[in-house]
Image (cartoon, grey):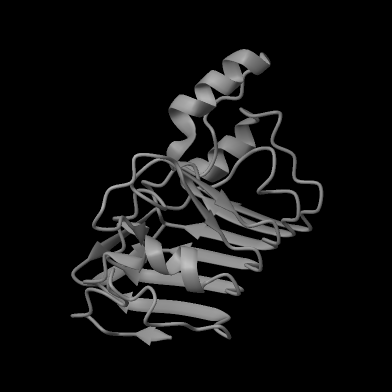
Amino acid sequence: MLYRLPKLKNVWSNHCQGYVSFPSLRNVSAYDCESLTSMFPASIVKGVLRDLEQLHISDCGIEVIVAKDQVSESVTSTFEFPRLTSLELSFLQNLKNFYPQRHTLEWPQLRQLSIRYCDEIEIFEKEVSSSPEIHEEKSTLDSKYLLLSHDKDIRNLEELRLDGKGAEMIGSGHFPTYHFPKVKLLDLSVQKATTISGVRVAW
């Protein structure tokens, strides 16, 4: 756990791959680390985090969860979290996307998803076309920053907590092809958060 480390800028460097391994690492948490702009470099995610089960980040300066490696990748990156069951992101006002380039995410065991006060990140596809051809074309162009795919990432979700745009999209029924067959707890809110004189306020 990383807690109240206001000057921390990096957890791992891009040179860690091949020199560091955490075969038993299950939980990663970061709270109140205002200078931390990313959680992992891409090489670490691809190499040593396949057993990660929980990822919780709150009140940090995070802009992306996974940072681009020094060598830019021209093809779509795939990040696999085969054992991840819980993802919680909250009060990350700078968070724009999971990874800054075109990518796909695989977390087939995801059971709990909570996204609170992360106003910039796109969780769902804004519009799902009934035409397979049009949908495929839109997915290629527009879905590179999405947190969830409508056809695979939500199959095993049991708890879903969202606010803001994500909650509004579910409430308005804009995407009929998103189905949540196993969700037992659904918590939606349109609350907003701001900071006044150093104190965080939500309404």
190 left or right of 75 in image = right
- Quarter of the rendering containing residue 59: bottom left
From the viewer's perspective, is residue 110 above or below residue 149?
below
Q: Count how many numbered circles sit on residues in the image.
A: 0
- Residue visible at 50% across and 84% down in the picture: 22
Q: Quadrant of the C terminus?
A: bottom left
Horizontal and vertical percent position of residue 33:
29, 76
Residue shown at 56% from the left, 65% from the top: 87
The quadrant of the picture occupied by the N terminus is bottom left
Question: Residue 14, relative to residue 104: is it above or below?
Answer: below
Q: Please tell me which residue lies in front, 130 or 78.
A: 78
Residue located at (54% from left, 39% from top): 124
What x and y, as percent, mark residue 56? Answer: 49, 72
Image coordinates of residue 119 in percent, x first then y, are 38, 48
Side of 33 where 159 appears, left or right: right
Residue 188 position, x and y percent, is: 60, 51
Q: Quadrant of residue 201?
A: bottom left
